[in-house]
Amino acid sequence: MSIYRRIANLFSRASVEREIDAELQSHIEMRIEDNLAAGMSAEAARRDALLRFGNRAVMKEKVTAMDTALVLEGILFDVRYAWRQLRKSPGFAVTSVVTLALAIGANAVVFSLLNALVLHPLNVPDAQSLYVIERGSDHSPSQSYPDYRDLRDRNRSFSSLAFYDIAPAGLNSDGNPAPVWLYETSGNYFDALGIQPYLGRFFHSSDEHGPDSAPYIVLSYAYWQSHFQGDPKVVGRAVQVNKFPFTILGVAPPKFRGTEVFYAPDLWVPVVNQKQVEGWSELESRATRGMLVVGHLKSGVTPAQATADLNAIGAALAKQYPKDDDAISFTLTRPGLYGDMLGGPVRAFVAALMLLAGLILLAACANLGSLFAARAADRSREVALRLALGSSRKRIVRQLLTEATLVSLAGGALGMMGGVLLLRWISAWQPVPNMPINVPVNPDARTYLVALLLALVSGLFFGMVPVRQVLRSDAYQVIKTGASGVAGNRRFTLRDLLLAGQIAVCAVLVTSSLVAARGMVRSLHSNFGFVPQNTMQVSTDLDMAGYSGDQVPLMQRRMLDAVSAIPGVTAAGYASRIPLNLGWGDSTVFADSTTDYRSSKGIADAMEYAVSPGYFQAAGTTLLAGRSFTWHDDQNSPHTAVVNQEFARKVFGSEQQALGGHFKMWGGTRVEVVGIVEDGKYKTLSEDPQPAMFLSILQSPTSSMWLLVRSNRGPAEAAAAIDRTLRRLDSGLPLTITTWYKALDTALFAARAATIALGVLGCLGAMLAITGIFGMAAYTVSKRLRELGIRIALGAQRGEVLRAALGRVFRLLAFGSAAGVVLGLAATKVLSFIVYQATPRDPVVLAGVIAAMLALGLLAAWIPAQRALAADPLILLREE
Amino acid sequence: MAKNDLQGTLDLLVLKTLSQMGSLHGYGIVLHIQRASEELLSVEEGSLYPALHRMEQSGWISSEWALTETNRNAKYYKLTAAGRRQLHEAEKNFEHLVKGVRAILRYA
C-alpha cells in the first residue's frame, strides 16, 4: 500500500534525499553532454544546464515535501470528515467523549497508583534487584541488629545489606528545637543502595566505631530546601539532635526519599547513634527486633538462591543462639511497603482496583460500541449511497475508525487532565497528622503513555463494532427499503449483548462499592474494645524533658493527679502505648510450667501494653472479671496482668481458669492474672481477635507515655485546660494533645481510602449504566416512534406503549444486573482483606444493589419513556 | 469535473510519454515532450521531479536505476497498471477541458 511507503519515506528521509540527489545529478550531466554535442563551450554548457534546472536545494525540498503532503492530506481529509460528522451530532460526540474521559481518567489514576506503589516503588539505581529480608513463616520484616550483622557478613548473595528504621527526634539548628522524622541506618546505607550525594558527602561504614561514634546527619533535599533555604554552606554545620552535637555531612538527591514509599524523611542518621537519637538503645540485643534489612542481589543470583543462602545462615544462627534465634528462617520480598505488612494488602488492593478500572473501560467501550453501532445503522443509507457511487469499503471503514479514534483521543486527553488533577491532590495529601506520610503518585511518562495506548486501543475496539455491519450491508437493499425497521426483529442483536454486558460490569462495580461502604460503616460502629468518644490523648516523652530513673513514675503520677483534678474530667489514666495507634509491641507468653524460653516453645504471642491504675475507666474498656490495677501493683509486689478474653481462652482454656492463674514471660518472670477485660482491636480494624495483656506500668516503667483524659467538656476546651495544667507542672514538657478520634485516623486510613476509591469507581459504573441504558432506550424509541404512534392511534394504553418501547431494555437490565451481582459477590471476597467486615452475604447490600440498578434503569429510561408516550400519531403520519 | 489544472496537464504529458516510450529517465521525458510537441511545449525541469516523485508515490509509475546508452547511471520510470488507468482518466478529463474551453471561445 502506498500509504505505508509514504510513511516509511518520512522516516528514511536521508536515503530518499540521497537518491533524489543522484537523479538530479545525472539529469544535469546528460544536459551538459547534449549541450557539448550541440557545440557549446564546456563552461557555457554547464551554465545552461544549471540555469534551466533552477535551485537544486529548493527542488529537493519540493520533492520530499510531496511525501509529507500526501500523507497529511489523506489523514487530514479523514479527520476533517470525521470532525464534520461529529459536529453534526453534538449530543453523541459529547456523550462518547465524556464517557471515555471518565473511563480513561479512572484507569490513568489507578495505573499511576500501580506504577508508583507496586511497579516502581523506589527511586534507586537498579531497583529490580533490590529486596527486603523477612523473617519466619509470618513474614515479619523486622530484624535485630546482631542478626543483621551476621546476615551482612556471612551471605554470598547480596552485594551489600543495609539496615534502617524510622524514628522521630528533636533537631536544633538555630536555637529552636523542632521535631523531625528520620531514618536511622547502617553506615553502608547509601553505598548499598547506590545513591550519590546531591551536596557534600554521605556517611559510610568506615565512620562507624561503636555506640554514638558517628554523630552525622544527611539532610533530605526537601528539608534542606524548606528549613535551610537550599543554602550550600550547611555542609559541615554543627547542630544538635536531642541536645547532642551532630554535624551535617551533606544533602541527598531530590528524587531520593528513602526506602519506604509512604514515608518522606527529613534526614538520615547512623543507627550506631541510636541512644542519642531515641534516648535508649538495645542494638546489641539479638531478640530486640524492629528494623528492616534491604539490599541489592548480586548480578546472576536469583531470589530463590539468595533465600537458600540466607536460610543456611539462619540454621547456623539458630544453633548458635538457641534462645533468641530459635527456628529462624528468611524470605525475600519487594522493598518500599514495609515488607509484606503493608505490601500484601496494598498490592492486593491496587490489583483489585486495576481490575475494576479495567472493567470500567470495558463497560465504556461496550457503551460506545453500541452507540457507534446505532449510529452506523442510522447512517446505513449514507454508507450505501457511497458504496453505490464507487467508494471502497476499506475507505469507509477507515473513516469510521478515524471517527472513533478522534473520539477516543479527545476522551483520553480530557480524562488524563482530570486524572492529573486528582493525582496531584492525592500526592499532596497528608493523611496522618504530625508525620511526613504521604502517597507520592504524581504521573510520569509511563502514565501518559498508558493513557494514550488505552485511548487508541479502546478507540479501535469500539470503532470495530459497526465495521461488520458496514461490510455486510447490501447497498441495493438498504436504499430500496430505507434504514428503519432494524430494531425489534431479531431476538438478540450485538447491541443487546453489549448493553447486557455493560450492565453486568456496572452491577459488579456498584456491588463492590456498596460492600466496601457497608463494611466501613460497620467498622466505624464496631467494638474497638475502647470508647474513643469524649476522650483526649496526650502524648509526651519524659526522657526528652530530662527525667530519668525513679523521677519518671513520680512525675507521671503527678501529671495524672493534676489532670484528674481538672473540673469536668471523669476519668484519666496513662499507658506505654494505646491500641490502634502507629506501632505496637508484642511478646511471647509461656506456660507457667516451662523452663525453656525459646520463642518456638511459647503458647501465645500477645499484644503487650503497660497501663496505669485508672486506664481502663479512661479508655472505656469494660472489666469483665477480677480487678484492675491499683497503686500497690508496683515494683515491690508480685507481677500482675489484666488480660483480654482471647488471651484467657488461648493460654488458659477459659476465662474462669484464667483468673488467678499464672503465666511466664520471656526470661522467666512469673505473672498472675488479676483481671479480664473485653476483646478489642489492636493493630488494625480488620484483624482477627488477638490475645492481649496489660501489665502494670509501675512494674514495667517507660518514659514515653500516652495520657488518656475522659471529660464531659468540648475537645478544644479540654485540650486548653490539659495544656495549661501540665505546663504548670513543667513548662518544658513536649506535648501533643489530640482527640482520640483524630488519632484513630491512622488506623482508619486504609479502610477509608479503600472506601473512597471503591465509591468513586462505583459512581463511575453507575454513570456508565445510566448513559448506556439511556442511549439504548432513546435509540429504540426514536426508531419505533412511528410504530408507537400507530399503536397509540389504535387505542393502546400507556402501559402497553411502555412495554412495547422499553420492555426489551428492562429485560436486558434485569439479565445484566443478575449476572453482575453474582460476579460482584465473588469479586468482593478480595475486599475483605482491606475493608473490615466486608462480607458480600449481606441482605442490605443485595437489596441495595437491586434497588440501585432499578433506580438507575428508571432514571435512564425516564426521558425516552416520556418521548414514547408523547408520540403523536398525526404528526408522525404526516412526516412521510 | 475533475482536476483540470496545470499539474494535471503535466501528469498527463508524463503518463502519455511513458505509455508511448516504455521506460524513460527524467531528462529523456523532458526531451521527448519537447520533440513530440514540435518545440511548442517545454517542461520546466524544476517541476518535473516533484511530479515524478508524487506519481511514483501514488503508484502510477515505478522506477529503477539503469545505465544509459552513454553508460551513465539514471533512474528510469515506467507506467504501472494503475498509471495506465490514470492515463485513461486524465485523457478523458483533458478532452472535456478542451471541449469546454473551445465551446467558450466559440461562444458568440
Image: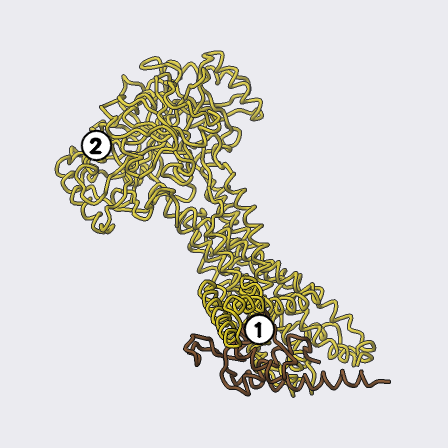
User: Could you tell me which secondary element the residue under label 1 belongs to?
Assistant: helix
The residue under label 2 is which amino acid type? Pro
Q: Position of residue A608 (x, y in %)?
A: 33, 32
**What's the mark number on residue A87?**
none
Query: Circle 1 is placed at which residue position?
Result: B48
Residue placed most toward the observer, A439 or A662: A439
Q: Quadrant of the C terminus of chain A?
A: bottom right
Chain B's shade in the image? brown
Question: Which quadrant of the structure image shows residue B71?
Answer: bottom left
Q: Position of residue A211 (x, y in %)?
A: 25, 22
For the residues tagged 2 and 1, is the chain the same? no
Chain A's shade in the image? yellow
Residue placed most toward the observer, A736 or A96: A96
Q: Residue furthest right?
A: B108
Q: Position of residue A276 (x, y in %)?
A: 32, 21
Q: CA distance from mark 2 to mark 1?
A: 84 Å
User: Could you tell me which secondary element the residue under label 2 belongs to?
Assistant: helix
Question: Which quadrant of the structure image shows residue A612?
Answer: top left
The residue under label 1 is which amino acid type? Leu
Above or below, A770 against A327 in this view is below
Count of marks, rendered view: 2
Above or below, B50 against A164 in this view is below
Above or below, A428 against A90 in this view is above
Query: Circle 2 is placed at which residue position?
Result: A146
Residue placed most toward the observer, A257 or A54: A54
Q: Residue at x 46, y 17 (%)?
A: A176
Residue placed most toward the observer, A346 or A853: A346
